[in-house]
Image (spheres, rainbow, N blue to C red):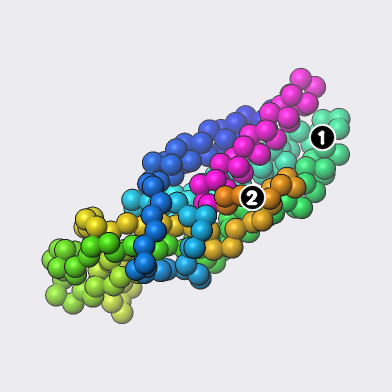
Amino acid sequence: MFNGAVVKLRDARTAIVRLHDLVSPSVVSNVQIMSGASGPKSNSVGTRDPVAFAESFSTCVAQVRSIGDAILKNKAAMELNGFKSWRELKKKECMNDDLLLFLNDRRNNDLHEGASSLAFVMHPFSFSSESVGAAPSPAATLLIDGTGPHWLVDQGTPRERRLPCEQIQGVKFTVAVVTPPPKHLGSVLQNPDPVTLINLAEAYYANLLYEARNKFESK
């Protein structure tokens, strides 16, 4: 009955493992280079690769959110006695929950507008522009922001892109959600960092799937 949601949950958990692999201890410094709507001041995690973290977080948001759709939009389940009333209760719960609304908005904004909810900080404990390596082309421009140093190549053409520089010793990165949701299931979120938010959302939808299967798969 809910095999599609089971697959979505499995895919989400695979994506979350990859996100966890990109996390490193958080750091604090008095020299910070920021990217995003506002720089993370608290509730941040460290990451060894900010570019990969941004991509992985976006994937996690989409994968976790899709579990809910696979449960609540299940066409076969619509024919079961009691499913529609249960579905309406769960839809209302999702629409009134800060974390789940955040997840839904982030998925839609990322999909339709390319907007990011993350803010990155580069902490240059020891950094020299000479450590980034040779430019990939004579016209390449060195850019430095919260996600680290990059080479801007083919500027002003359809092929314009940013190439991350080599890993640099003495540079650390942190990442936080720009405007994190304040509550989940009525409780204040004490540490709404990006990884915690994804973990909590996955747990909610995993419980929702468990409840749906127990209530309706035997009918």
Q: What element carries label 2?
A: loop
Q: Note whether residue 97 is visible.
A: yes
Q: Please tell me the numbered disc located at residue 83.
A: 1
Residue 72 location in percent, x, y?
A: 72, 41
Who's the residue at 50% across and 70% down the image? 38
**What's the residue type where badge 1 is placed?**
Phe
Judge whether residue 199 is colored magenta.
yes
Who's the residue at 55% across and 45% down the image? 196
Give the position of the C terminus as an image quadrant: top right
**What's the residue type where badge 2 is placed?**
Leu
Q: Please tell me the numbered disc located at residue 189.
A: 2
Classed neighbour count for the residue bearing mark 2: other residues with Cα under 10 Å, few (<14), some (14–19), many (≥20): some
Report the span colored magenta.
193-219
Q: Nearer the viewer, mark 1 or mark 2?
A: 2
In the displayed structure image, the side of residue 77 where residue 193 appears, left or right: left
Residue 117 location in percent, x, y?
A: 53, 61
Q: Do the residues labelled 1 and 2 touch (CB within 8 Å)?
A: no
Who's the residue at 74% across and 24% down the image? 214
In the displayed structure image, the side of residue 204 where residue 116 appears, left or right: left
Who's the residue at 39% across and 41% down the image? 21
Residue 133 location in percent, x, y?
A: 15, 63
Observer-nearest of 140 and 38: 38
Observer-nearest of 198 and 2: 198
Q: Is mark 1 on a helix, strand or loop?
A: helix
